[in-house]
Image: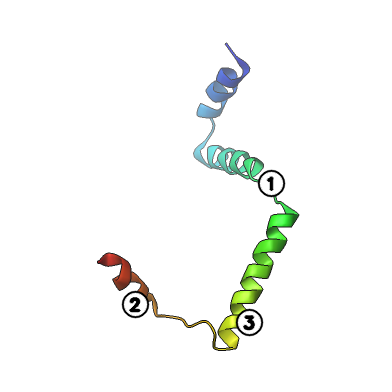
Amino acid sequence: MTSKEKLLKEALVLPLHEKSALIEDLIRSLDSPDPVIDTLWKNVAENRIDAYDDGKLLSVSVQEAIAKYKK
């Protein structure tokens, strides 16, 4: 039995809340923060806010956005 198979066998008998916590921890371990990407997204968000505040970027209601893509 491989270590993966052994881990899976052990995990399958855990209570539901412990399985859920284990899954969350495993998923979180796959996506570690990247400061460069975080900074880029921060800049994008700030630029969009500035454009909206300056009237260069318009908004639509949720209903309008949903209607557009229901067609």
Q: Which residue is most to the left?
A: 71
- Number of marks in the rendered image: 3
The amino acid beneath tag 1 is Ser
Q: Quadrant of the N terminus?
A: top right
Q: Measuring 59% from the left and 87% from the top, which residue is drawn there?
A: 53
12 left or right of 54 in image: left
Label 2 or label 3, whichever lies nearer to me, is: 3
Q: Residues within 10 Å of mark 2 (few under 14, many from 20)?
A: few
**Helix or strand or loop: what does disc 1 sit on?**
loop
Q: Earlier in the sequence, mark 1 or mark 3?
A: 1
Q: Position of residue 66 (x, y in %)?
A: 33, 70
Q: Position of residue 20 (x, y in %)?
A: 54, 42
Q: Position of residue 32 (x, y in %)?
A: 69, 46
Q: What separation in Å lies between label 2 and label 1 (alpha carbons)?
A: 36 Å
Q: Residues within 10 Å of mark 1 (few under 14, many from 20)?
A: few
Task: Judge whether residue 40 can be spotted in this image.
Answer: yes
Q: Which mark is residue 32?
A: 1
**Residue designated by label 3:** 50
**Helix or strand or loop: what does disc 3 sit on?**
helix
Q: Quadrant of residue 70?
A: bottom left
Task: Judge whether residue 13 can be spotted in this image.
Answer: no
**Helix or strand or loop: what does disc 2 sit on?**
helix
Q: What separation in Å lies between label 1 and label 3 (alpha carbons)?
A: 29 Å
Q: Is residue 71 above or below residue 55?
A: above
Q: Measuring 59% from the left and 21% from the top, which residue is drawn there?
A: 4
Which color mode does the image show? rainbow
Q: Which mark is residue 63?
A: none
Q: What separation in Å lies between label 2 and label 3 (alpha carbons)?
A: 23 Å
* Residue in front for this viewpoint, 44 or 25: 44
Q: Is residue 51 above or below residue 7?
A: below
**Residue designated by label 2:** 64
